[in-house]
Image: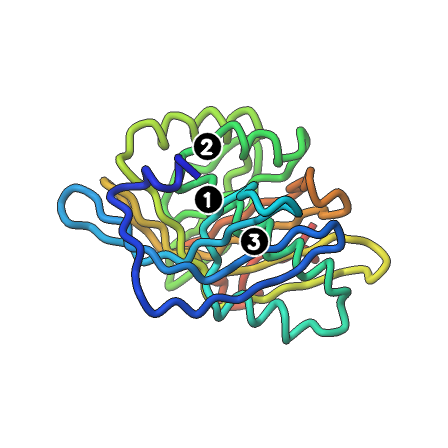
Amino acid sequence: MKQIMNYGKVTLLPDADLQYFSNDDGSVICRGIPVSCRFHGRRTFSEQLSVAINPKGLIEHVSMGVGQQLATEIALDHADWAEESRKNLVNFLEDYRTAYALKDADYLERVFDDNAVIVVGRRNLQQASNLNDGYWINNERVILTRYTKAEFIKNLRRVLAGKEYVNLHFSNSRIIKPRMDKEIYSIEVKQDYYSSNYGDTGYLTLVMDLSDKKNPVIHVRTWQEEPDPNFGVISVFDF
């Protein structure tokens, strides 16, 4: 709670449209608490916080919501999935956003599998020796670079340490459950990345195992600047 309230200068906003979700253990999640987070240079982000309240009425966890549109897509567009599965998926994405906002590289290191596949596709970069692959967009070569978990986390810690703030926005989602008997999900989203000294827009794919809701595991993370004109966004079916 304290870390969230120190995310810039936080101001509680009026006109809250709160939603409450009960869990089997008696806890409740309240979503949609509107706040404004302001940083130096007058950069302001509007957020909707999600608060987990335990059966004793105490706040147990606070995270940054994924936005009403994405939460609604998960809840309504996948009604054939178990309600608990949909809740876990929203919770995971909220925690993922929050980890970047709070620059919590320790959390991200925990959730990535030690053998996770981590691929970044960028234009006109020197081809990495550990992944000889790529494609073309508008006559420009896009090189796919694969990182180990250790390489990715080391670079992530360095990048996060040099920023006043980081903020991720998700939109245009496509969520796939390859097997109905497994709690494995692939989510593809358009990601807008904002920070104090850099910003970009790209397409993020995460393949994760939510069998243990308290210990989610990311098996695949890919990012590309634009969808490929032939195969689109890299998906779970490309691995």
Q: Position of residue 121 (x, y in %)?
A: 47, 47
Query: Could you classify mark 3 by the number of other residues whose Cα lies within 10 Å: few (under 14), some (14-19), or many (20 or more)?
Result: many
Q: Is residue 158 left or right of residue 148?
A: left
Query: Is 31 located above or below residue 75 in the figure?
Result: above
Q: Is residue 37 left or right of residue 68?
A: left
For badge 2, the amino acid type reads Asp
User: How many numbered discs sit on the rendered protein?
Assistant: 3
**Which secondary structure, mark 1?**
helix
Reading the image, the residue beneath label 3 is 205
In front of the other: label 2 or label 3? 2
Q: Position of residue 220 (x, y in %)?
A: 63, 44
Reading the image, the residue beneath label 2 is 104
Residue 157's image quarter? top left
In whole angstroms, how far apart are the C-alphas of marks 1 and 2? 8 Å
Residue 72's image quarter? bottom right
Do residues under tags 1 and 2 come within 8 Å of each other at their CB atoms? Answer: yes
Residue at horizontal 63 percent and vertical 64 percent from the top: 175
Q: Which mark is residue 98?
A: 1
Say which quadrant the N terminus sits in: top left
